[in-house]
Every structure is written in C-alpha cells, then in structure tokens.
Amino acid sequence: MQHAYEKYLKEVLIDEPTLQARVAELGELITREYAGSDQLMLVCILKGGVMFMTDLARHIHVPHEMDFMAVSSYGKGARESTRNVRIEHDLTVGVTGKDVLIVEDIIDSGFTLSKVVEMLWTRSPRTLKLCTLLDKPARRQSEIAVDYVGFTIEDKFVFGYGLDLDEKFRNLPFIGVVNLDSLKDE
C-alpha cells in the first residue's frame, strides 16, 4: 500500500529511532540544567513544535508547566517568510519570574523566533532559553542564540514529525526531505 506522503518524499533525513534517541538526550540535558527549579515553563511554538514538545516533556524529569503560542510569518503554501510576524495565539499564563524554555520545530531564518524572544523578554522571565529540534544555519538572517539543538541540517525543505507540507503530514514519525518536483503540478 502506498502512503499519500510518498509522492512528496525524496528521502528520509532523520528516521524515527534516531529522532526519539535525540529527544531523550535533550530531555536529560534539560533535566540536569533545571534541576532544583520549580519554575520551568515549556513554551511550544504551534503548530510544528507540538510533537517535539510532547515527546520532549516526557523526558524532562523536573516539574514544569506547558503553554503555547501560535506565531506566523509564513502564509499557507508559502516557502519563504514574509517577515511580518503575527501572534495568532498568545500565552495563557504569565512568565514573570519563570525559567522559560521555548520549544520550536525548526529555526530557519531566525527572524520569527528572534521577535518572539524579544517579546518574551519584555515579560520579565527569570531565564529564557531556546530548544529547537532542527537548526538550519545556512538560511539564518537574524542572530539568535540556540541553547539546545536536536539536529543541524543542510538547507533542505523538510516535513514530518510536526513540520508540515501545506498543513499536512505533521503526523509522520520521521523527518523527510520534500521532492520539490512533486510540487510543480500543485
């Protein structure tokens, strides 16, 4: 049986066992760093970061809260940032005095996330750090300090494990590279 995603898949970049092993390692690092903290708050950047954050949270063994932000600088079907950052859903609780860890699926240009970091610092967290599953430094346009990186990848268009292809295929348990030729007809 052929799966719908196969039409768009050029190659599997990071398979499921490799992904899950790295997520567990990141959880252990974060647990050690925040040992003794009772103010850790994971802030997931929706929608792409959800799968990563829920798996990561299972490996963080210090008490923590979770909240969500929806931030966009891409439109549906867009392949490049518009550089117009919109907060589509803000946090539901305050971050003042908390150890905030932003959890992101991928850092590309860094523009959107740098605006989120700038905004969250104005809310007086005790600390503010960044954890990303994927880092794509070849496309960086804004300086941004990343504290935890799952994988550094080349400049490839990827999908799966939370990352979408026109809002689809976030459910894949691996990260694949998009076959760009498959998009020409759409």
Image (cartoon, rainbow, N blue to C red):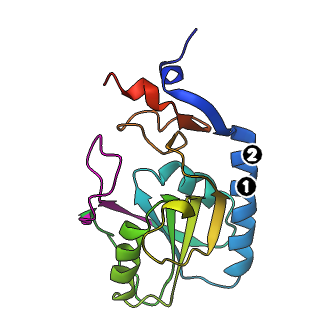
CB under 8 Å between discs 2 and 1: yes
Identify residue for label 2. Answer: 18
Q: Position of residue 69 (x, y in %)?
A: 35, 63
Amino acid at pointer 2? Thr
x and y percentages locating residue 22 in the rendered image: 73, 55
Q: Which quadrant holds residue 96?
A: bottom left
Q: Which residue is mark 1?
A: 22
**Residue appearing at x 66%, y 80% in the figure:** 34
In which image quadrant can residue 121 be found? Answer: bottom left
When the figure is inspected, residue 56 is found, relative to residue 40, above or below; the finding is above
**Residue 184: horizontal and vertical position, in percent?**
36, 26
Question: Residue 169 or 77: which is nearer the viewer?
Answer: 77
Q: Nearer the viewer, residue 125 or 38?
A: 125
User: What secondary structure prevails in the magenta region?
Assistant: loop
Q: Is residue 4 left or right of residue 137?
A: left
63 horizontally vs 126: left or right: right
Q: At x 42% / y 61%, what residue is drawn?
A: 45
- Taking the magenta stretch, the answer to whether it contains residue 95 is no
Residue 183, x across and y down, in percent:
38, 28
Q: CA distance from mark 2 to mark 1?
A: 6 Å
Bounds of the magenta span?
A: 67-86
Quarter containing the C terminus: top left
Q: Residue at x 54, y 73 (%)?
A: 130
- Residue at 36 percent across and 74 percent down: it is 116
Q: Is residue 64 above or below residue 182?
A: below
Tell me if mark 2 has few (under 14), some (14-19) or many (20+) residues whose alpha carbon lies within 10 angstroms of its own: few
- Taking the view exactly as shown, the residue that stands out farthest to the top is 1
Give the number of the disc on residue 42. none
